[in-house]
Amino acid sequence: MLKKDNINLKDIILTDSYNYPPYNIEIDGKSNMLKITLAVAGFSIKDLKVSIQGAHLYIRGYQSRYLSNFKCVYQGISQKNFYKKFILLCPMIVHNIFISNGLLEILLFQNYEEKILNINIKDQ
């Protein structure tokens, strides 16, 4: 595998066309790190799963319905499950992942060993 000096947006392909949940992709050119941030309000750590297998980054959200004595008369907060799959054309490994204030942040850096990894999410 050839080593790349800098990561760029062309190194990441989102394989679905759904806009839910909204996300950002940021690149730090100095440290050659990549950050993917997803808006996951209403999801807890146990509702989310992040894994990386070879060139594929998988992010899944399975939101359990909460029980309430209240009857919902208007629902503006989505409770949809989601699945995101990114293809990383540059080999990456997860450096850190955490959830804070309804945002799931995944920090990645270049890696040259192919492994299957399931990543624990930290509460920030």
Image: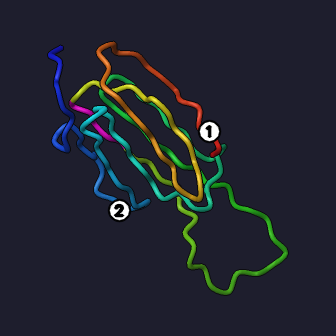
SS label for mark 2: loop
Query: Alpha carbon of mark 1 to alpha carbon of mark 2: how far?
Result: 25 Å
- Specify the segment rendered in magenta: 85-89
Determine the main secondary structure of the stretch shown in magenta. Answer: strand
The residue lying toward the viewer, choosing from 4 and 76, is: 4
Residue 55: mark in rendering: none
Q: Is residue 91 magenta?
A: no
- The x, y position of residue 107, in whole percent, is 42, 37
Q: Quadrant of residue 89?
A: top left
Q: How many marks?
A: 2
Q: Is residue 86 magenta?
A: yes
- What amino acid type should be assigned to the residue bearing mark 1? Lys
- Left or right of 20, for residue 45: right
- Left or right of 69, for residue 31: left
Q: Is residue 16 above or below residue 74?
A: above
The outermost residue toward the bottom is 73
Query: What residue is pinned by disc 1?
Result: 122
Crowd band around label 2 with a 10 angstrom C-alpha radius: few (<14), some (14–19), many (20+): few
The residue lying toward the viewer, choosing from 16 and 57, is: 57
